[in-house]
Amino acid sequence: MKKLLCDMNVYASRLNELLRLIEEKLKEIPYIDKIMAIKGIGLVTVSGFIAEVGDIGRFDSSKQL
């Protein structure tokens, strides 16, 4: 049980560090603050969206996006 709890703490620390690094990288994107301002949209959702779509500035309209 102690080993499992220790492992859980290690994984939780890794997750927190990864989320911190993702947040730092996202801050480099100019329009991220506007996306993050949308109610219900969080760090994980935004990072996944940007990973899939890339630069949204390359689209001419929201329909293309």
Image: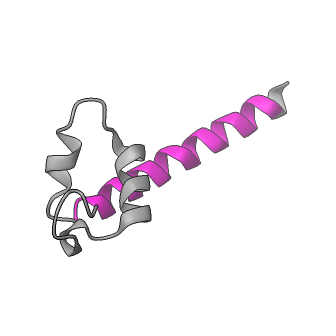
Q: Is residue 53 above or below residue 46?
A: below
Return the residue nearer the eye: 17 or 48: 48
Q: Is residue 48 magenta?
A: no
Q: Locate residue 26: give its quadrant.
A: bottom left
Q: Is residue 7 left or right of residue 35?
A: right
Instruction: Give the total of numbered labels.
Output: 0
Q: Is residue 20 above or below residue 2?
A: below
> Quadrant of the image for the N terminus?
top right
Q: Magenta segment, which residues?
A: 4-28
Return the residue nearer the eye: 34 or 26: 34
Q: Is residue 48 left or right of residue 25?
A: right
Q: Is residue 51 left or right of residue 30?
A: right
**How far from the left and from the top, in percent, is residue 30?**
14, 64
The residue sitting at 23% across, 59% down in the picture is 27
**How far from the left and from the top, in percent, is residue 45?**
40, 45
Q: Is residue 1 left or right of residue 5?
A: right
Q: How is the image coloured?
A: one colour
**How far from the left and from the top, in percent, is residue 23?**
33, 53
Q: Locate residue 63: give its quadrant.
A: bottom left
Return the residue nearer the eye: 26 or 15: 26
Q: Is residue 36 above or below residue 61?
A: above
Residue sitting farthest toward the bottom? 58
Q: Is residue 16 magenta?
A: yes
**How far from the left and from the top, in percent, is residue 29?**
21, 65
